[in-house]
Amino acid sequence: MIRTRTIRTIVKINWLYLKRDVVALGLTFVLPLIFFSIFAVIFSGFGGGGSDAGPPAIDLLVVDLDSTETSRRYVAALGKQEALEIATAPSPTEEVPEPAPYTLEDARKRVREGRFPVAVVLPPGFGATLGAFAGDSEPVELIYDASNPIARHSVSGLLQAAAMTAGPDLLMKQGLGQLEEFGGPLTDQQRRAVEEAEGYFQSGEAAGAAGPGGAAGLVAVEAVDVRTFDVEDPEEKKRKRSIVPYQAAGIGVMFLLFSMAGAGGALLDEEESGVLERVLLSHASMTQLLLGKWLFYGVVGFAQVVLMFVWGALVFDIELWTPNRLAGFTAMAIVTAAAAAAFGIVLATLCRTRSQLSGMSTIVILIMSALGGSMVPKFVMPDFMNTTALFTINGWALDGFLKVFWYDDPAASLPRALLTLAPQVAVLALMTVTFLTVARWLARRWETV
Amino acid sequence: MTSVLTVTSAEKSFGETRALAGAGVELRRGEWLALLGPNGAGKTTLVRSIAGRVRLDAGEITLLGTRLDTTSGDAVRAARGKLGVVPQEVALYPKLTARENLTVFGELLDISRPTLAERVAWALDWTALGDRADEPVERFSGGMKRRLNIACGVLHAPEVVLLDEPTVGVDPQSRERIWQMLEQLRQDGASLLLTTHQLDEAQQVCDRIVIIDHGRDVAAGTFDELVRQTIGSGRRVSVVLEGEPPAALLEAGLEAAGGDGTSETLAVRVEDIGEELPELLARIKAEGGRITDVHVEVPTLQAVFIHLTGRELRE
């Protein structure tokens, strides 16, 4: 028989305990906000976060061994790339107001020391062969640090773009020279037309302006955020979308699991102090005790998730305040908190001591979080890892929260929006029941021996 | 007196360890019974089996007329509802106040709401913690925690109370207070079974004593009965004489038990104090001895315990 009075008492005890324990309160409600904020600040940079901030520019060391007009124009074009922060010489100091340009040795040394993720060396003869199609151009040396593969690949692409913006007139000349070499000389009329066009190319207008997500080059690019198609307001259409909700879900769920695992440890403390024995000597049964604790932890977990997302909405522009999102978020927060609370209890019943619980929960939660997408977005994971994510709380919770905040259909009715969450809600509910059942079975060791 | 609790031939093993090997105990209505035994003798296991926390391998437990080991369901729950258990550990929520601890444990004991308020008030008064009722228990002294620990176990006014080492680790003043509390419980009609290491106090306050060793009861009865069963009615008598003792007395079997230059003590064991002591004193006088003092050794529970178990209680 389930006695609601006993469960209420268990909830009351835990609430009084949490209320009196300032450290536990801080760990439960303040620390997650701090972590959340740190990650939100990091990730709001990548998506724009509603501000002009973008991903940080890549520091690029440039060594110009060619020192021709063409190579200087090329370096200048590199400097105009938003994604690059170039340096051709050390910063001036009082002692050395005009430092010498970097050398090849400087480039290798500084990349090796981690002071630059990547360096570009323009070899002698670079200008003379820029844009040569015959494969006889002098190769640019790209010195990179393997620990930052993104910088290497980004710079590789930007080098090509810079070639187009640095000197379209040079490229045209180079191209026409090769055309004449292989196809015969131009006519006088053609030559005059080219000379007339040269001024236009030298002015830089031909390089064009970079679009929102790309650079000018051989192919003009206009990047369009898929979430702006239905937006009428031109200003709103231009606004960059924050990917904070994407990461908020991941961090939120991971923190929730850590909190619940820690809270579940109270069972072990009570066993050690003899309180568990006394509770079981009363009219309370183990089932009632576990249900009471699960209910309390679930409510605390729900409050934790709500707090994180409300904080995210107020400070980091998470769009929470629409009926569909509020309803979907509430549904996901409830089932996620319920599953996490049950997970915390099952871990506690599995372990014999606090230190066991601490070690095991850290390992299990980190693995689940890595597989489930809390640490690294699932789209960068191989297929088999996406499959294993199906066995984690994080995987399902994240899917649900992303459906609410990222992959939602703004035009959908409320019931329809909620219906899309049915698989995630169902699986998390099933996990909750499974965890509680296993916990009850494991808790037999605390009953009559 | 009728029995309120009877345990017979209780057996329990934990793996290779045999905790109970046929132990038995009987608690009578309104009685205060001490369960004594060295560490590991099986006392706590016996108490926990009565409380329902340990399932016996064999044996019978009857509480208030209900067989706990064979009866199931409501009858057992009803019988156990009249049982109060005070564990050896201070099993309290340290961050909760005294009043909150009493309230939550009262709720867990299923005391009805109107009664609970009265019982909490009674418990605070009984433990003399009324003025500290709203302070977190973690600020209490060891003795105060012990008192509250007992109160939480008897809040539902049980007929039978099991107390596992209720005074362990408290100072003599607090211990005295706890004994007074328990005496009051008994006067209110409760029957008490307690395990303790305080032999002198068990001897003073308890009606009967059961000594348990190696998982079985080795003796039971009042203190006088235990003394008779074990060390008998023999006493060691010491007689202090002025100056050197007459040689005839030493030759007659009295042994020199020390002296300080001006007096000498002679000691002898007598089997019947009533008959032999007057004869002894007369003989010393007849031999010219001048008696300045006489000591008769009083039998103690400690002596009984060592006689029965061959070791000190704390071994």
Image: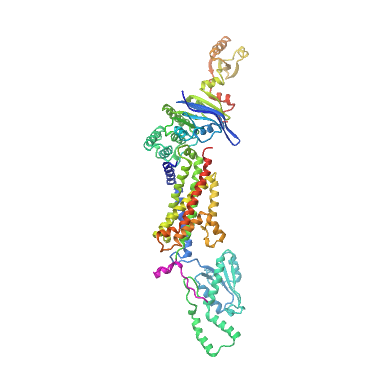
| Residue B196 visible, this angle | no
Q: Is residue B43 left or right of residue A231?
A: right
Q: Is residue A237 magenta?
A: yes
> The N terminus of chain A is located in which quarter?
top left
Q: Residue at the location (53% across, 81% down)?
A: A169
Q: Is residue A96 magenta?
A: no
Q: How many numbered marks, from 0 up?
A: 0
On the image, the x and y values in percent for residue A398 come to 49, 57
Check the image and name the residue furthest to the top.
B286
Q: Toward the viewer: A76 or A172?
A: A172
| Colour pattern of the rendering | rainbow
Q: Which contiguous range is marked in magenta?
A: A217-240
Q: Toward the viewer: B59 or B48?
A: B59
On the image, the x and y values in percent for residue A184 come to 59, 87
Q: Is residue B148 left or right of residue B44?
A: left
Specify the quadrant of the image occupied by residue B18: top right
Check the image and name the residue furthest to the left.
B114
| Residue A123 visible, this angle | yes
Check the image and name the residue furthest to the right.
B251
Q: Residue at the location (50% across, 51% down)?
A: A431
> The C terminus of chain A is located in which quarter?
top right
Q: Is residue B13 left or right of residue B187?
A: right
Check the image and name the residue furthest to the bottom.
A188
Q: Toward the viewer: A78 or A245?
A: A245
Specify the quadrant of the image occupied by residue B234: top right
Q: Main secondary structure of the magenta part?
A: loop
On the image, the x and y values in percent for residue A108 come to 60, 68
On the image, the x and y values in percent for residue B299 come to 54, 21
